[in-house]
Amino acid sequence: MKNILTILLLFTFGAVTAQDLNCAIEVRSDNIQASNKEIFSDLENAISQFMNQRKWISDKIQPQEKINCNFVINITSFSIDQFKAEVNITSSRPVYGTTYNTPIFSHFDQEWNFQYAQFQNLDYQENADVMKLTTLLAFYANVIIGMDFDSFYPEGGQPYFNKALQIRNLSQNSPGWGPSDGSGNRNKYYIIDQLMDDRFRPLRSANYQYHMQGIDKFKNDNSAARKEIFEALEKIRTVQERLPNSVIFKIFFQAKRQELINIFKEAEPGLKNRAIELLGKLDPSNVTNYDKIKS
């Protein structure tokens, strides 16, 4: 009996430690008229279990290394078991030696189309598009993990971007997955297309430099860290000048905008002015926000 209990405890402990994401899920249905509102809370719970209890990462990670992410799923259309939604997706990771979490990913996806019946099990297979909902979730899980790993190791996220590309290729004939669906060049198709494109490799290199050589060293030497972060931004500029309006830049600056303002507010005057000028070029639709660095 003792041996059986030990095996059960080990199995249970293994299931807990296998979790790789710390993912908060919120399903909103405020504008939906439905007689059975419980389906939305059931959907929320099902997605939460799917994201948080699944083994996504090939490496063994410690509980404190789980990747924090948030999905706010706003249901825009619902009929029996057919859903359409707009989803705001964010992720972050801890900064070395601090309690601060730095944002990594921020994207608003306007094209989620899926089927879900109340109490339905969420099935997923890596090599087949068996369920639209889990395909969407798995795509973003791998993109989030890939960008997180890129921030710790040079191009460390490649295995997960490969998986996201495979998901995209399996799904690209479905609504919301094609190159012209949703928000034009800001959709799922182009997110992974650009992450896999060699022309965007300086951006991935900048992701590593910004975090491991910049913000992770901010506590010990904030002046040197700011310079590393500025150099990372200059790497991004080399790509942005050739490929403006790419979705991957939108994602980066949507995540980092406020953090960059806070970082350069305390810079010495010369670097502060250069940062304002550079950020205005890299994120021109938000140029007035960067004037806050002056204050």
Image (cartoon, rainbow, N blue to C red):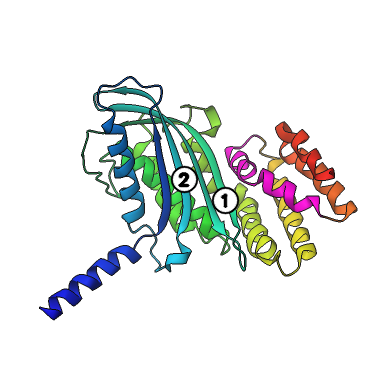
- Label 2 or label 1, whichever lies nearer to me, is 2
Residue occupying the point 37% across, 47% down = 138
Residue occupying the point 54% across, 53% down = 92
Along the line of sight, which residue is nearer the eye, 29 or 289? 29
Q: Residue furthest top?
A: 33
- Residue underneath mark 1: 104
Residue 27 x %, y %: 39, 35
Residue occupying the point 76% across, 58% down = 226
Could you tell whether 54 is left or right of 262 in the image? left
Q: Residues within 10 Å of mark 1 (few under 14, many from 20)?
A: many
Residue 113 x %, y %: 36, 29
Q: Is residue 37 above or below residue 55?
A: above
As measured in the structure, the alpha-carbon distance from the residue carrying label 2 to the one carrying label 1 is 12 Å
Q: Please tell me the numbered disc located at residue 70.
A: 2
Along the line of sight, which residue is nearer the eye, 51 or 135? 51
- Residues in magenta? 245-266
* Residue type, mark 1 in image: Ile
Label 1: state its secondary structure.
Answer: strand
Q: Quadrant of residue 54?
A: bottom left
Residue 97 x %, y %: 62, 68
Could you tell whether 236 is left or right of 154 in the image? right
Q: Is 138 one of the magenta-colored residues? A: no
Q: Is residue 87 above or below residue 12?
A: above
Q: Is residue 69 above or below residue 96?
A: above
